[in-house]
Amino acid sequence: MEHDFLIYMKEHHTGKEKAVPSAYLQRRFLISSRTVRKLVNQLRNEGNPICSDENGYYYATDQKELLNSIHQMTSRIIEIAKAKNGLVKALKHFPNDSGQLRLEIDEGREKR
């Protein structure tokens, strides 16, 4: 599926002007929105230039398109980090049984 998805994006949705909404890809491949996101993430992790913007997903044609997508992701990372930090601050409202606060890291997940 991953290979077919990549070939399809290269052949039909190269360039920002040919961006395709997730809903279209869901219908085209008979998959869920979660599966679209998972496929895109896997392809990106392998170094394939699958970009996205407000119009959908596309295969990058140049460095500018790729940098725009990287910038968009960086902005989302910053906002997610702010939200996480706010939740960490909220931990003061939920001390453990001993009355102490504790934040443990477990396989990339934080928990009290």
Image (spheres, rainbow, N blue to C red):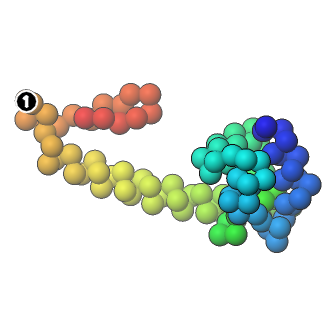
Q: Is residue 11 left or right of residue 19?
A: right
Q: Quadrant of residue 38?
A: top right
What type is the residue that disc 1 sits on?
Ser
Q: Where is 66 relative to 88, above or below?
A: below
Number of labelled discs? Answer: 1
Kindly identify the residue that appears in the image at 71 percent across and 63 percent down.
21
Q: Residue at x 63, y 48 (%)?
A: 32
Q: Position of residue 42 (x, y in %)?
A: 69, 39
Relative horizontal placement of residue 84, taking residue 58 as reference (left or right): left
Circle 1 SS class:
loop
Position of the N terminus by quadrant: top right
Q: Residues within 10 Å of mark 1 (few under 14, many from 20)?
A: few
Give the labeled residue for mark 1: 98
Location of the C terminus by quadrant is top left
Picture layout, residue 36 above or below residue 12 = above
Q: Looking at the image, can residue 51 be seen?
A: no
Quick check: can you spot residue 70?
Answer: yes
- Quick check: 60 left or right of 90? right
Q: x, y percentage for residue 111?
A: 30, 35
Q: Is residue 19 placed above or below 6 in the rendered structure? A: below
Place of residue 13 in the rendered image (x, y in percent of width and height, measured from the top left):
84, 60
Residue 97 on image: x %, y %? 9, 30
| 112 lies above or below 89 | above
Q: Residue at x 74, y 42 (%)?
A: 43
Q: Give the residue at x 36% y 31%.
A: 105
